[in-house]
Amino acid sequence: MLQPETAQPERLAVTPREPLIDGFGRRHTYLRVSVTERCNLRCAYCMPPEGVDLKPRAELLTYEEIARVVRLFAEMGVNKVRFTGGEPLVRKDLETAIAAASQTPGVECVAITTNGVRLKRKARSLRAAGVNSINISLDTLRPDRFERITRRKDFHAVLEGIEAALNAGFHNVKLNVVVMGGVNDDEALDFIDFVKDRSMEVRFIEYMPFQSNGWSEGRFTPWRETRAAIERRYTLVPHPQNAGPSEVAKTFRIADSPASVGFITSISEHFCDGCNRLRVQADGSFKTCLFHAPETTLRDAMRAGASDDELERMIRTALLLKKRQHAPIEELQQLSNQTMTLIGG
């Protein structure tokens, strides 16, 4: 049996169940699992200056519980699992959870989103455990600006982490860049220059409003402005993967380059109609939309002895409450949503 933080998992069995379809006919095949609320950076758009109240370790899902959650969702048609945080690499023995997910029948892709600070020493073990795809958050290529954004001095560690991921043989490496007006919106071309000779993708993400994260209309930069800045120097060719109904990024190949660029347009052009994502937070809270409050807690149910069938009913009941799309920006600014570090992205 899988022990909470150390043992390697055995191959897990799957009993097929009905797919996860909400009230608007959207089929959900992508699960994001946060493994920790902790982070070794303090990015203002993710964590408020005063920090957050972290839950005790005992209130977070164990790796055994995470494995059970992943198996159950896989039985209901989930084929992609992404591990997030906080910063997932600050949790000890994360490879245990990754290996369990990668060995779950039905799971075709195991991904991770990291800030890259600890990636240099973890890249090879993550790949060995079963990670297929890795996203690295980096909002600037200037060390002094990095320190202002993150309140930490780990810029060069992140660059080393990026190189370690490429050297470890990852073929699907993306850089996530949150574009903030007056902060880093002048660096789009710098990021294209950074990736243009690498087999990588840089993704420019529209700044989204969350609790105490400093969002304002002046800080918001629509994706079309970022694209226009890039096209002053580079030719962007639409990528075939744009055709996918659940694809969240508008993706382009950079002409005469192995690299590509994507734009996450959550605010100016939402992609709710094709949403296939669900989220389980580090404490087991189940969330059907990034901008909505958690609908239920799987942790409490599991620890009270709930069967898989009972958990399934909880999940499906919550899914039926999922709205067609998130609220307009005027309302999002007023929502008392959680901070991004607690949600898990």
Image (cartoon, grey):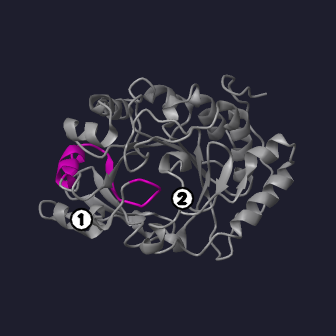
Q: Identify which residue is drawn at 76% across, 65% down.
A: 317
Q: Position of residue 331 (x, y in %)?
A: 48, 72
Q: Is residue 123 visible?
A: yes
- Distance Cα–Cα, label 1 vs label 2: 29 Å
| Residue 199 lies within the magenta run | yes
Q: Which region is colored magenta?
A: 187-213
- Residue depicted at 45% across the width and 26% down the height: 122
x and y, in percent, of residue 108 in the image: 59, 48
Among the two numbered marks 1 and 2 on one chain, the one whose residue lies closer to the N terminus: 1
Q: Quadrant of the N terminus?
A: top right
Going by the numbered disc 2, the residue's amino acid type is Asn
Q: Nearer the viewer, mark 1 or mark 2?
A: 2
Q: Callout 1: few (<14), some (14-19), or many (20+) C-alpha neighbours within 10 Å? A: some
- Secondary structure at badge 2 equals loop
Whether residue 33 appears in magenta in the rendering, the answer is no
Q: Callout 1: helix, strand or loop? A: helix
Q: Nearer the viewer, residue 184 or 133?
A: 184
* Residue highlighted by disc 1: 227
Disc 1 marks a residue whose amino acid type is Arg
Q: Is residue 104 left or right of residue 325?
A: right
Circles 1 and 2: CB atoms closer than 8 Å: no
Q: Residue furthest left?
A: 233
Q: Is residue 206 above or below residue 192?
A: below
